[in-house]
Image (cartoon, rainbow, N blue to C red):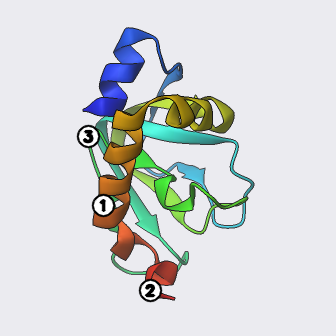
Amino acid sequence: MVVRQLLESGILSGEPEQHEAGKFLFRAGEKIEYFLFIMSGSVGLTASLDALLPCVASQYSLLGLTDLMNESYTQNALVLDTTSLIRIRRNDLLEVIQQDPQLRFHLLRQLSRQSTWTKAAYE
């Protein structure tokens, strides 16, 4: 809810988008220029394109969070059903993280929950 509140208050800015099922939002290896906050719908996250069962991210998830300190995505994000999201520029998110302790704490909690979304989590 913290990210949503920051977006609603204008402290964090982003561009709304809507995507249909079957579209890749990003692929592993692509440079990270933005994060995606899901308002509704669902997105499958996989470390490889041939993975059978993706982890599913849904409403109020911040996609790309597991790669916050990386230069490129380590996962593929595939839209599973019609999804509305907010595209947040990486630099904007990093700036607000530095200024807002509540957001830092929230993202740390989210990262601990999402640690299984990447095979590198335990390496």
Q: How far apart are the two marked residues, 1 and 3, measured between alpha carbons? A: 10 Å
Query: Residue 17's spot in the image, x, y percent?
Result: 49, 26
Asked which secondary structure carries label 3, the reply is loop
Secondary structure state at the residue bearing disc 2: helix
Q: Residue at x 29, y 40 (%)?
A: 41
As shown in the figure, which amino acid type bears the numbered disc 1? Answer: Val
- Kind of residue sitting beneath label 3: Gln
From the viewer's side, name the closer residue of 116 and 30. 116
Which element carries disc 1, helix, strand or loop? Answer: strand
Front label number (2 vs 3):
2
Q: At x 26% / y 40%, what residue is drawn?
A: 59
Q: Is residue 83 visible?
A: no
| Picture disc at residue 56 | 1
The x and y percentages for residue 115 are 37, 71
Look at mark 2 in the image and give the residue it sits on: 122
Residue 56 at x, y = what percent?
30, 60
Mark 2 crowd level (few <14, some 14–19, many ≥20, 10 Å Cα):
few
